[in-house]
Amino acid sequence: MEGIYLLILAGCLVQCCLAGTYGKPGDLRLITGDGDDNSGLLQIVGIDISWGTICNDTEWTSANTDVACRQLGYLGGAGTVSYSIEVGTPISIRGVNCTGDEWRLVDCPHVKNAGDCEHIDDIQIACIPPGVEACVATEDGAPALSGRVGEMDDLEPGACVQHCRGYGFLFAAVDLQNRCSCGNEEIEESEPFEECRTEPCSWDEELSCVGEDRAVVYDVQAGNCGGRISGKEGTLLSPGHPIPYEAGLTCTWILEFTSPVTKISYHKVSMVEGDQVKVMFPDFSEDEVIPHSRPSFSKSTSAKRVTVVFTSLNSSTGGDGFFLHFQDDAQCEIPDIMNGSLVTEPGKIYRPGERVRMRCDGSLVYSNASVFCRRDGMWFPTPSCDVYVHGLTVELIWTILIMVIVGLVTLGILFALTAVMLACIKANDSRKSGKVSFIGSKRC
């Protein structure tokens, strides 16, 4: 008996270790040279709790890339790429076909086996880099944004953003010729981002960069030292982004969430030793202290307000920094239903708007044939199964019984009133004939 308990305990320990090392089924990651860039080989955690690649055995769509990138915490997809990356993992899924509205890639139709796939068919994607606002079209070499201050030609993205930030602009734009422009106008329409990475970069021909007659627009405020960010979704970048941060900084951000549950994703954590990011959650007993180097990870919270503090030592030589993204993570938990259950897929997370069928035991009937997940994370209507007798539910039987009782009481009252009226009529007739009624001589 003790041996059985030890085996069970060992199995639990292995499962916990695997979950901590590999993540949960459906989790995604990008594998590149340093593991921190926004493009590379896409991998997913399979049902066996191990990482695997995704086979592109059908036409991979931009909707697939968008869903994967949003799940990873990016603004969206920027097309596919092709790197020489060797992997030692199996192929987990194939035949992915997203509509673009899904929350996670595993929510899209797919096949959970490798089939005839080989690793040469592994999908590699690019996501929109952090801090990028849009991809816009330019006309006849004109600057993408209206503001120009000083010398702004031949500036790489980091230098352009720093230049515009120094003059108080909200946005910075860089085109194929590295021409920089600044502005405060809102971007009304964005082109597909893959159109902004169809040409070789001028500083590295092996990388694809801004397309012809296109410009990448950056959010200058994303690299501010501290501030307040609110909403269902937002991005926080290390101060000075996209250039390395400075020494001797203390920056505080207040994140205010409007969703019932929010997922915070941490990307590209690359700081000098001694520098750190501290995230203070009111619903956790301890703060999350992010060390100077750590792989990407995510954490969900039901808090409405989170404080983020970044500090760099006075002796710091600066680093690439960090990228933090938060987004709505509302989901409906699978409930325990008396005498029934929901027809669900193992390991799947159900998001607002999704509908699920009910299954009741053999002697029961549905109170609702299906239920759907609301935006507040609750099922509607409330899932339940009702007991029935000879085709009638208990609730209906009680309703009929009460109606019968009320009907019988009403008939009894009417019968009594009728009897009294008849007795009065008989008494009046007897008095007129000179006889005394059995109810006395008083008039009715």
Image: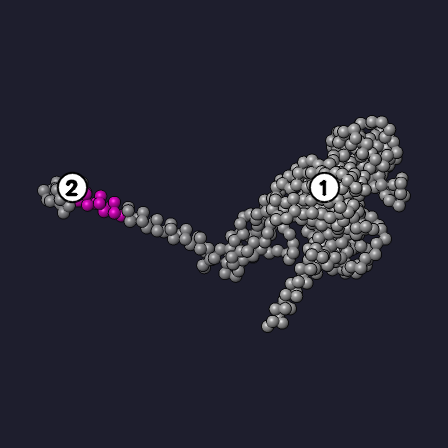
Question: In x, y percent, where is residue 75?
Answer: 73, 42
| Magenta stretch: includes residue 291 | no
- Residue 150, relative to residue 438: is it above or below? above
What's under tag 1, amino acid-wise? Phe
Q: Residues within 10 Å of mark 1 (few under 14, many from 20)?
A: many
* Residue drawn 29% across the image and 49% down it: 412
Residue 440 falls in image quadrant: top left
Q: Is residue 305 visible?
A: yes
Question: In x, y percent, where is residue 380?
Answer: 55, 47
Q: Which mark is residue 428?
A: 2
Left of 412 or right of it: where is 438? left
* Residue drawn 74% across the image and 31% down it: 186
Question: In x, y percent, where is residue 248?
Answer: 76, 38
Circle 1 residue: 310
- Which range is magenta? 415-427
Left of 115 or right of it: where is 357? left
